Image (tube, helix red, strand yellow):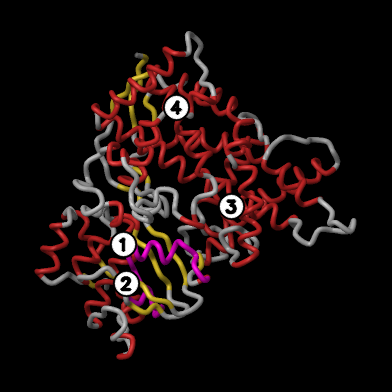
Amino acid sequence: MAAIVEAPNGDEKNAREHGLASDRRDALVSVGLLQPFWCLRLRQEEAAQVCMSSSVRLCYQSTVSISALHLDHGFSLFVAVSHGRVFKTSILGRPTVFVTGREASRVLLSGKDGSVRLNLSYAGKQVLGPTSLLTTAGEEHKQLRRLIAEPLSVDSLKRHFQFIDDWAIKTLEGWPGRPVLVLEEASTFTLKVITSIMMSLEPAGGEQDEFRANFKLISSTFASLPLKIPGTTFHRGIQARNRMYAMLDSMISRRRNGEHERHDFLQTLLRKHSKEGEDGGDDANKLTDTQLKDNVLTLLIAGHDTTTAALTWLIKFLGDNPHALQILREEHGRIRDARNGGTHLTWSEVNSMPYTNKVISETLRKATILPWFSRKAPQDFTVDGHTIKRDWSVNLDVVSMHHDEDVFPDPEKFDPSRFDKPLKPYSFLGFGSGPQMCPGMHLAKLEICVFIHHLICRYKWKPLDEDSSLHATLVRMPKNKYPIAVEPL
């Protein structure tokens, strides 16, 4: 029978002071069968290096660690029960450290001396493949990042701007007169944009439908138990990945035969894949077919889920904050009026949206779409004076950083003016930071700017459900998918 492990009274009081609602107490329920693995006493020499607790407290903390995706305040709960910025526990016998703050952020994201590496789950590694940007390290990772950066650069995105603008208009035209689930609509919009940019997939038709069906199965795999048993989420996801790779194999074959050349991400990588070295032989740095497919899938996953969530939260926050919405309408109204007619945006107009960019940043801060940055230590290093041992898992709690009152006063308030002045490095991680900056940042901002322009210039909306609870997945999304009713202005 599952046991309920409760915090001592003082800790419970502190947790509540950090804004945890009473209905979140289920996050403290521990599964009895797993407790023997969690409740491990730590070696005495480790206790001198990182703040420790008794085995009972450790069991409680481990449960909270696993359940933290359900919470709104991230590490603030850990601070309440462990009283420090570095919190160590053991999950299934594996040393796991939770950290927060600018110093921890700098150490984990600067990539200095290769002190940390991305700590992808086993399921994630199996889905994305061995040559994905997210599963490689060292020089191989740097090479892939350089190759991927070019087709996602600002100059390359200009070629796709008109398609993004057209599809935003078309998507929004279908909203008035019916209940709209913003999350579902944002998902469809971003997937059609990313598949067009990646491989020139038509936004409608059988190929798009097949691709979307496989993609949804793959996306659900990351938070699943990695059981290769028919009928499980993981098994269905791997099968969908194999079907998607078969589609990519067919595309690659047609491109190589000159049947279907396009100006897209895949074509750019194929040119790099096919290039010869200076001596006329194969270039040792060219991409293999496996690298091509693994990294197309990686960018599809990374470019879809996070942008979908960001767009949904932004629309919700604007609906909840009329003052910010009015300022944004004024900015976009000036852009529209200066155009002297016409519906379509221009590239120069997208680059004249300073308040819009602050709204995007504030959305990413308040929502904190990726609550954790997980890394693995390939060698010993220190964070805030604490030694992190080789092979330990290290998790940077971004939620608590984005709700740190010393950096963001009144953190629960939606206030884009926070970004009127530059912030200190590594305090805001909306798109990561340093060498770990998101390679798709420019694309995400472009999609959001275009979509929001057409939404607020032509429509108004009201929520159909006030539920603000989170759907606890790897990417934080509103549980109710934010249903709204839309009317023309």
Q: Distance between the Cα atoms at labels 1 and 3?
A: 28 Å
Instruction: Kindly identify the amino acid type of the residue bearing the numbered disc 4.
Output: Ser
**Lower sequence index among marks 1 and 3:** 1
**Lower sequence index among marks 4 and 2:** 4
**Lower sequence index among marks 4 and 3:** 3
Q: Position of residue 313 (x, y in %)?
A: 35, 39
Q: Distance between the Cα atoms at labels 4 and 2?
A: 40 Å
Q: Are marks 3 and 2 in contact (CB under 8 Å)?
A: no
Q: Residue 404: within the magenta?
A: no
Q: Residue at x 13, y 65 (%)?
A: 12
Q: Are marks 2 and 1 in contact (CB under 8 Å)?
A: yes
Instruction: Please name whichever residue, 88 or 142, is drawn nearer the observer in this view of the structure.
Output: 142
Image quadrant in which you'd find residue 389: bottom left
**Lower sequence index among marks 1 and 4:** 1
Instruction: Please name whichever residue, 210 or 135, is drawn nearer the observer in this view of the structure.
Output: 135
Residues in magenta?
Answer: 87-113
